[in-house]
């Protein structure tokens, strides 16, 4: 006994899906490269501390205004730097998630950010 499966586009439909997946993969690779090249800056302490990170979350620069340096309160300076670094990294991650989500249509792809 033979079972017949209705033809629902078959190979043509599969080819279109593969082309779509390949385009999405190429777009994601291109965007990933672009995101890694970008820089993200955040400040804390009312602009006393400015931190810039790249898309790989590596610190590119830290700027500290002289008035932020109090030899008797190094802990405050440490806290301000920590806040600015974390915010800059958070900005990089959020941007990557939003822009990758635009390409993937909201698909939750493992290993992506």
Image: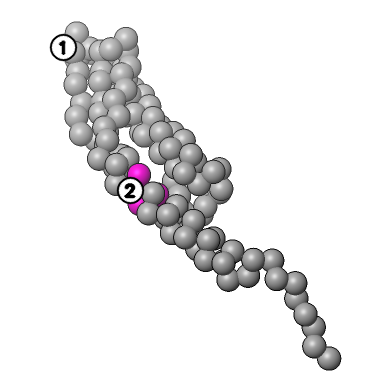
Rendered residue at 59%/64% (across/down)? 13
Residue at position x 25%, y 40% from top? 37
Residue stretch in magenta:
28-32
Q: Which residue is mark 1?
A: 66
Which residue in the structure is indicated by mark 2? Answer: 30
Q: Earlier in the sequence, mark 1 or mark 2?
A: 2
Q: Quadrant of residue 85?
A: top left
Asked whether residue 91 is drawn in magenta, I would say no
Left or right of residue 69, residue 102 in this image: right
SS assignment at label 1: helix
Return the x and y of residue 69 as percentages of the image width and height: 20, 14
The spot of residue 42 in percent (x, y) is 32, 22
Quadrant containing the N terminus is bottom right
Given contact means CB atoms under 8 Å apart, are the residues at marks 1 and 2 in contact? no
Q: Residue furthest bottom?
A: 1
Q: Residue at x 34, y 29 (%)?
A: 88
């Amino acid at each position: 006994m033979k079972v017949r499966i209705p033809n629902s586009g078959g190979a043509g439909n599969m080819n279109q899906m593969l082309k779509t997946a390949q385009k999405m993969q190429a777009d994601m690779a291109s965007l990933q490269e672009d995101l890694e090249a970008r820089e993200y800056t955040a400040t804390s302490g009312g602009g006393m501390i400015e931190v810039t990170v790249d898309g790989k979350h590596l610190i590119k620069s830290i700027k500290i205004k002289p008035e932020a340096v109090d030899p008797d309160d190094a802990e405050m300076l440490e806290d301000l730097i920590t806040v600015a670094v974390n915010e800059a990294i958070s900005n990089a991650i959020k941007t990557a998630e939003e822009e990758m989500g635009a390409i993937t249509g909201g698909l939750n792809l493992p290993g992506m950010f």
